Image: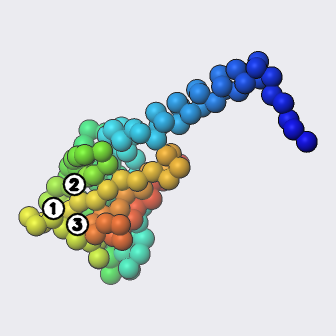
Amino acid sequence: MTIRISRWMKVVLLLLVLPIAWGWYVVAADYDYSALSGTYVFSGGGEKCILRLEPNETFTQILSRDGKTSSVQGSWHRYGEAHVSFSAEFIPLVGEDLKPLGAPHGQFDKTFGFFPSLTLAPLPDGPTFRKKLFR
């Protein structure tokens, strides 16, 4: 059995698919500060960390470890397409590697182009934060 698609159906399909594909690309390729800002959560190794990234390049980190909670504020800087480094105020997590001068750093990824996550060094196996979709 062969299905025949008329020329008009092809045009209609093309007119539907192109805007959807373009819309997906616009979101998936956006690694701007405003697109990456939000609340990220990590839980593992006896730690729970909430990391709030602001579009003005500041962050707030709340880390619970060994029954103690610490809170710090600092700055974050995106470089390349999806890499990030944090100021010295960032409290390193267990299993995280730092740059030679001690700066925490990592990389953003997007699942299906829509759902950001942040993995700290060592890449790709470091601590991974998941972005909260809802407040």
- The residue most toward the right is 1
Q: Is residue 99 left or right of residue 34?
A: left
| Label 2 – label 3 distance at C-alpha | 13 Å
- Camera-near label (2 vs 3) is 2
State the image quarter where residue 47 is shown: bottom left
Expressed as whole percent of the image width and height from the top left, the position of residue 115 reads: 49, 50
Can I make out residue 133 in this image? no
The residue to which callout 3 is attached is: 91
State the image quarter where residue 31 is shown: top left
Expressed as whole percent of the image width and height from the top left, the position of residue 99 reads: 15, 64
Which label belongs to residue 103? 1
Badge 3 density bin: few <14, some 14–19, many ≥20, Cα 10 Å: some
Badge 1 density bin: few <14, some 14–19, many ≥20, Cα 10 Å: some
Query: Which of disc 1 and disc 3 is earlier in sequence?
Result: 3
Answer whether labels 1 and 2 touch (C-beta < 8 Å). yes
Identify the residue at horizontal 23%, vertical 59% (top origin): 105
**Amino acid residing under circle 2:** Ser
Can I make out residue 28 in this image? yes
The residue to which callout 2 is attached is: 85
Report the label total. Answer: 3
**Amino acid residing under circle 1:** Ala
**Amino acid residing under circle 3:** Ile
Identify the residue at horizontal 15%, vertical 61% (top origin): 103
Badge 2 density bin: few <14, some 14–19, many ≥20, Cα 10 Å: some
Nearer to the camera, 108 or 62: 108
